[in-house]
Amino acid sequence: MMQQYLALKGEVADALLLFRMGDFYELFLEDAAIAAAALDIALTHRGQHLGEPLPMCGVPVHAHEAYVARLVKAGHAVAIAEQTEDPAAARKRGAKAVVRRAIVRVITPGTLTEDRLLDGRRANWLLAVFPGPGAAGLAWADISTGAFLMATVDPATLADEIARIAPAEIIAPEGDSPAPLPAATVRLPRRLFDSDSANRALQQRFRVGTLDGFGTFQRPALAAAGGLLGRLDETARGEPVLLLPPQTAAAADRMEIDGATRRSLELIDGKSSLLATIDRCVTAAGSRRLAADLGSPLRDITAINARLDLVQWFTSDSRLCDSARSLLAATPDLGRALGRIAARRGLPRDLLAVRQVLNQAAALQALLGDAAASGAPEALQHLLGSGFRIPESLGDLLNRALADEVPAMRNVAGVIASGFDPRLDELRALQHDSRSAILALEAQLRAVTAIATLRIRHNNVLGYHVEVASRHADALMADPQFQHRQTLGSAMRFDTAALRDLATRILTAESHALAAEAAHVEELEATILESTAILGQLADTLAALDRHAALACHAARHGWVRPRLTSGRDFHIVAGRHPVVEEALARSGDPFVPNDCRLEGSGRLWLLSGPNMGGKSTLLRQNALIAILAQAGSFVPAAEATIGIIDRLYSRVGAADNLAEGRSTFMVEMTETAAILNGATGQSLLLLDEVGRGTATWDGLALAWAILEDIHDRIGARCLFATHYHELAALDERLDALSLHTMKARQWQGSLVLLHEVGEGAAPGSFGLDVARLAGVGDPVLNRAAGILHRLESGDAGGRARAALADLPLFAAATAPPAPAADPLRQRLAATHPDLLSPREALDLVYELKALAADAPSA
């Protein structure tokens, strides 16, 4: 048995092998140790291997999917070795014969189809990468729905594309890669990544002579597709896999968002993500579509407006929107049901799901068609025309063939409806009401023989038989249709051909009924798969409708408005709000303070200052999210929004390190900033928060100054540049498109009050000491810090550093001759922000200063 195990393990060296032994899947050796730790189950030993105790662990067959899900989630591939021979057959080959086994499937994170192993609201992409030197090819598929896309991208943007796709599994050819790939990438033989072989394989799979009808696919993308097909063949082990015809995914069609920006803005992942906040979809497929749209905002104004038209149409008729959502809510996940049926892992409920979808789609088509007759956007007319091609004959067949309720498992009776197959109905009748059939034959035999006491009985020796009293035996012995079986003291037992036939049909009725149902199920699955293309398109249409209706529902509930998209460099947001923060505040009963933002013309570059916790980061992020929502085809949280199409969005907000790759917080900050400066164009939107704060003060200030100038002079992008370097406000005199703004705050009864409202001008300081006081830092530390701050700002410290920068206009004031030694009066004045004082506080300050002056020594 261990020889057999090791032979099978050699086929899947990189996977954990679940080896079927009766009612358990067992794991041995190193696989057992890994699985036991990952699953938190007992690691035992049985016998010896190479003179050492043999480690093993196991999971029950009936519950193995839950354990497989945990292993896959932990990043492991899992191979399933099943018994392919009956143990009785093995025993006939010899007392020590081992039951034959074979690997029937390899399960990896990117090749899942089972509901229990998948998140219904997230796509499960398997991504193949061919990182060529001049261009990188990508091919990614979700075999649970059949979605299949291909693209060729610049190697410099490969990491960003991977972040956008967010695959569950990445594969690439063995050997060195011109572009860096994630550490978890699975390496496959390079021979699989052959563009010519892939082209032929795709033509054969989709039964076409050329792929031109699906789009234009360059060689790098075809090479990646070859690796993808190879991975699917390796894991499916001969079983079919659902793949719809490939689609092209050109980078020029969508807003580019790099991986750091995606993480910073929390678009898709997490309970506080944008997706989690606005997802009101009533179907899993709708949620997957919404996630895809948020992850890949469009750049084509016509396509964006087509989406917005449909959202607005649903918004304008709440009753229609609610009716459509009610129908959609009763619509199962057609795409994933098709995936399981195609992979021969479908359950009876998947057939029922297809039937239910067709019925609900017909009702939805009628509802929307009636409404569209009185005027509807072109996008809806298109969906009703091409997306709702409902195969009526298939729907009729499923309505007739399937029972109202079906069993949860395959090969269980009750899938096919009564009346669909008369022969099946007869078998079921025999199975469930054999007594009636026996009584009917008994009555027939009594009539033929005129023996009123004739009985049909049953025992475990003779089975079914005819029994008569001994006095009637001679009559039956003379009748050729009766065959004598047994003589008793008072009775005689006989058999007939009709009784034998009936007995056989009764005894085999259950197995024959199951076989008949299985045959019908196979025929239904084959018929469904003949309509895969139409059903796949219908699934996409239903997901799109759910997505648009859900966005309309959310917009109506939260007062969102339709954005206006232009081809220029507009960016004008009136009373914009952060959708995630606003919802979080609403739960606690606190209002969100909306803010305007206008990045246009002479004010396309905002220098945003103000205290920590004042709302700078929120303002940056909310405008990024508004731009993403708008170009994804959604209404936005604002009173008005006019946005010129953004080609690339960059957000450098927050601080984080990457110690695993040896990168400090400042190194990560500069790497992300370099990506912005190297990739941004005049059509981009840049959001930079606290650039330069990760290093020494003068280094950081110099970097922030130079970066701000570069964005203004060379790139010309719309930009929100938040900083605590309030000294940068001096650049307002030289940079024409620079506009000074600050997050408002004020002093109230000795404390700093954050207003979270943006205003014009620059902050008088960083308010660091005030924020420290809010955080609970004690007065002794704060008083000492105030004195040190005064010395630093007056030139008593850092003189040499300032002298080195004396020729730079920005630092002219900072490099002035040192001020006289500080005294209490000067320290108090240095810590005062006149613009933030209330009249009462100003009067109190005058008395305080007068007292300090009286105590000061004379000059």
Image (cartoon, rainbow, N blue to C red):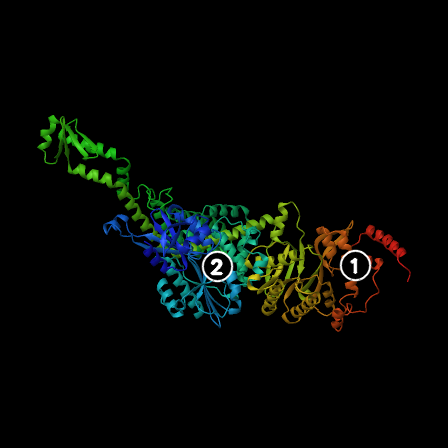
Give the residue furthest to the front.
51
Judge whether 135 appears above or below 269 on screen.
Answer: below
- The circle on residue 646 is none
Image quarter hosting the C terminus:
bottom right
Q: Amino acid at mark 2?
A: Pro
Task: Tell me where residue 244 appears, x and y as whole percent.
Answer: 40, 59
User: What secondary structure is marked by label 1?
Assistant: helix
Between residue 583 and residue 379, name the one nearer to us. 583
Judge whether 406 appears above or below 859 on screen.
Answer: above
Q: What residue does disc 1 label? A: 787
In the rendered image, which quarter is residue 781 located in? bottom right
Whether residue 524 is visible: yes
In the rendered image, which quarter is residue 565 located in? bottom right
How many angstroms separate mark 2 from mark 1 (CA)? 54 Å
Left or right of 416, for residue 292: right
User: What secondary structure is marked by label 2?
Assistant: loop
Q: What residue does disc 2 label? A: 167
Choose mark 2 or mark 1, whichever is in front: 1
Q: Amino acid at mark 1?
A: Gly
Whether residue 115 is visible: no
Q: Residues within 10 Å of mark 1 (few under 14, many from 20)?
A: some
